[in-house]
Amino acid sequence: MDPFAVLGLPRRFTLDMKQAEARHLELSKTLHPDRYAAAAPNERRMALSRAVEVNEAWRALRDPIKRAEAILTLAGKQVGETREPKPAPAFLMEVMEAREELDEAKGNAEHVERVVSRARAQFAAAEGELGAAIDRGAFDDAIPLLGRLRYAARFLDEARLAEDHLAGF
């Protein structure tokens, strides 16, 4: 499935997400089952199938990792954590140091907050680099950047969990 085609959007990483969401809502309203209650069974099934496709497309496009995977797959590239090249040793060292810092920060709300802030910035930078590579058509360059974004997303989630834990959630 091409989520961009389903929603009638350009196949670009950098999207106007408000426009994409508006398109999703517009199509969702058009395909809502209540509009097809009196329709023939095959027409109801087709509308329901199309509504499911629209929702899946929106889920793919609103997540930057899934959006990148969709573009790279449509460009004929193999993606997925097991199919992508192994990260560089320097990157692995960065990962290890960031995890150590998070472990040391646990228990200190101020320190965890700084780690979360850096994790957000790291995620934004990784997303920006990946988006720039994809949008200029440098798909081979984008694949390792996708790995960095995956890491940044996981680390940000872990840092937020540590922050939530300290806040009592």
Image: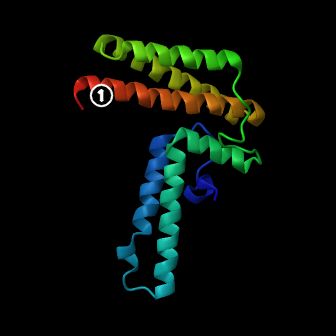
Residue 114 visible to an observer of this rendering = no
**Does residue 165 sit above or below 111 in this rendering?**
below
In this view, the residue in front, 17 or 65, is 65
In the image, is 157 to the left or to the right of 164?
right
Quadrant in the picture for the C terminus: top left
Quadrant in the picture for the N terminus: bottom right
In this view, the residue in front, 117 or 71, is 117
**Does residue 137 sit above or below 165 in this rendering?**
below
Q: Residue at x 57, y 44 (%)?
A: 66
- Could you say which quadrant of the image residue 85 lies in? top right
Label 1: state its secondary structure. helix
The spot of residue 101 in percent (x, y) is 45, 13
In the image, is 22 to the left or to the right of 107?
right
Q: Residue at x 41, y 56 (%)?
A: 25
Return the residue at label 1: 164
Q: Residue at x 50, y 52 (%)?
A: 58
The spot of residue 146 in percent (x, y) is 64, 33
The spot of residue 109 in percent (x, y) is 29, 15
Q: Residue at x 64, y 44 (%)?
A: 69
